[in-house]
Amino acid sequence: QVQLVESGGGLVQAGGSLRLSCAASGRTFSNYAVGWFRQAPGKEREFVAGISKTGGATYYADPVKGRLAISRENAKNTAYLQMNSLKPEDTAVYYCAAGSTWSLANQYAYDYWGQGTQVTVSS
């Protein structure tokens, strides 16, 4: 089992920045790819960004390319999502997930999920 806890969400004005963290415990974190997903009210959960086990490969959804950056520190069992130039449409609950997968954008490929952290971007 891997337990994931997200933090760093909050309220920010459009154009601002936030950094989300995903702290892992349990099994060896470096054995798992990590993905960030989000779910806005009334919408389905969608892929945001993913990173491979070693951090050597990353993948982003088109709406966030150039604004959001995923990273990880395996020595700290933590993954991050740096969010810049935020827009109101980025408002959602953000979830991190871990799984033994190369299919970074496929939410069904992830085995473990955090509880989510709310990000609200005001206009």
Image (spheres, rainbow, N blue to C red):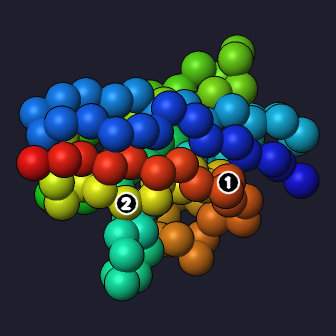
1 vs 40, left or right, is right
- Real-space CA distance between mark 2 and mark 1, rounded to the nearest whole angstrom: 15 Å
Disc 1 target residue: 114
Q: Which of the 4 image quarters holds residue 92?
A: bottom left
The correct choice, above or below, for 20 with respect to 111 in the image is above
Q: Which amino acid type corresponds to the residue marked 1 in the rendered image?
A: Gly
Q: Which residue is mark 2?
A: 92
x 52%, y 71%: residue: 107
- Above or below, 47 against 42 in this view is above
Q: Secondary structure at mark 1?
A: loop
Rendered residue at 18%/36% (across/down): 13
Q: Position of residue 45 (x, y in %)?
A: 43, 74
Q: Position of residue 89 (x, y in %)?
A: 18, 60
Location of residue 42 by image quarter: bottom left
Q: Residue 46: x percent and y percent?
A: 38, 70
Residue 102 lies, in percent from the top left, at 52, 57
